[in-house]
Image (tube, rainbow, N blue to C red):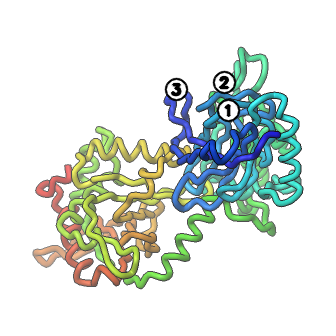
Amino acid sequence: MAHLLRTSFLAGSSPSLRRRPFLQLPFHPRRRSLQPQATIREIFMPALSSTMTEGKIVSWIKTEGDKLAKGESVVVVESDKADMDVETFYDGYLAAIMVDEGGVAPVGSAIAFLAETEDEISEAKSRAANVSSGSSPSAPPPEKIPENVGAAAAPVAAAKPASVVVASTHPASEGGKRIVASSYAKKLAKELNVELGAVLGTGPSGRIVAKDVEAAASTAVLKSDAARSVSAPGSSVQPPPSLELGTTVPFSTMQGAVSRNMVESLAVPTFRVGYTITTDALDALYKKIKSKGVTMTALLAKATALALAKHPIVNSSCRDGKSFTYNSSINIAVAVAIDGGLITPVLQDADKVDIYSLSRKWKELVDKARAKQLQPQEYNTGTFTLSNLGMFGVDRFDAILPPGTGAIMAVGASIPTVVGTKDGRIGKKNQMQVNVTADHRVIYGSDLATFLQTLAKIIEEPKGSKLA
């Protein structure tokens, strides 16, 4: 009789097969002298990050009954920060899927069974049924799918919906004969009246997954709503059509992680210091080198890193409440809003990298963040955080300190301001407000004051500061 073992899965490492970040997970084989060789194995939800407590099944790359080879991708899992392909350690057959696409399961719980031979598939299905009848991971019932669509379409997505591409030969088809989509995506498309032939797949090899259908449905509603508003001039502004008012929507995996971090930050004693910085010289520099691919975010990150190099205490952190660490690297994390949450891609060694390379790296990180393809070291290694709402016209705000860091700086918009000049006359200068929130266990008011003086000097006199 076959025996059931819990075994680890491995996130893929083959560049030719990967479209998402991957992560190798530990596996500890049992001693053969103590345990017979297993022929039916349990596939369980892996821990893809240190903060992950549960994962969501984005899509099953394989279906029940498919033959698997060791190292082959089986399922795409959404952690609290990114989507990752998970591969099998063993040859065999995907016998039974226990958590459907869109379902959520705690780390370490069973999501499927793997049978070594075809003859054992029926036995694996039976075991899966027995496990499911006891306690199984949560999966949203079909009637709640529209509510989940509302949760997935955050305001950012509503403002800039994903594009819908119509092609004579679909990228997820085989010679244009059939459209390749996951079973959950097909069911969702039917319920939301979405034509799969008009959806561009973002899954492996162009496969259509649930989030593609949701994006297409959201776009269709937006277009319909826009048409109605044009035909009825003078009508009142309506709420975003992707939000179903009066409904209760559970946190997404990422929103849950953000919530936990924000609650944890409340235990840290913080204080805030603001400063006004004139940006005329920075604006002129940006205008000069913008054509070479330089971004304002990279300029601000570089200026901040150069100032931190002279004030290492502001780049330090306290994690245990008993000591603090002078971080050896200056890694600037920058907050980025993405669909359904917030993430902080990290510009590592920002004080040492030239502005052109830093800008290229930032663009790459933003693209990966919005595609949920960041690897852990690209979002959890920050030593100082920037949060910039200036592009929205916000002139000042306070930011919440991320756990494990010493300070975060909120950057407002650069605004033309009437000021007194050195010769006593009235003039106009562009100025921005920055507010720094810091951990008062480690950083004191004078530390922030001198740091902000240095930052202001770098921004106001960039030529002599190695900013560019």
Asked whether 105 or 89 is in front, the reply is 89
Label 2, label 3: how far apart the Cα atoms are: 17 Å
The answer to whether marks 1 and 2 mark residues whose Cβ atoms lie closer than 8 Å is yes
For the question of whether residue 198 can be seen, the reply is no
**Secondary structure beneath label 1:** loop
Would you place residue 380 above or below residue 195 in this image? below
Which mark is in front, 1 or 3? 3
**Secondary structure beneath label 2:** loop
The structure residue drawn at horizontal position 56% and vertical position 48%, both measured from the top left corner, is 28
Location of residue 32 in the rendering, given as x and y in whole percent from the top left corner: 63, 42
The structure residue drawn at horizontal position 72% and vertical position 18%, both measured from the top left corner, is 174
Asked whether 346 or 468 is in front, the reply is 346
Which mark is in front, 2 or 3? 3
Residue 118 shown left or right of residue 85 in the figure: right
Q: Quadrant of residue 405?
A: bottom left
Label 1, label 3: how far apart the Cα atoms are: 21 Å
Would you place residue 198 above or below residue 124 in this image? above
Asked whether 249 or 327 is in front, the reply is 327
Dot label at residue 16: 3
| Residue that numbered label 2 is attached to | 171
Which amino acid, mark 1? Answer: Leu
Q: Quadrant of the N terminus?
A: top right
Q: How many marks?
A: 3
Which amino acid, mark 3? Answer: Ser
Sequence-earlier tag: 1 or 2: 2
How dense is the environment of label 3, judged by Cα within 10 Å: few (below 14), some, or many (20 and up)? few
**Secondary structure beneath label 3:** loop
| Residue that numbered label 1 is attached to | 200
Which amino acid, mark 2? Answer: Pro
The structure residue drawn at horizontal position 56% and vertical position 51%, both measured from the top left corner, is 48
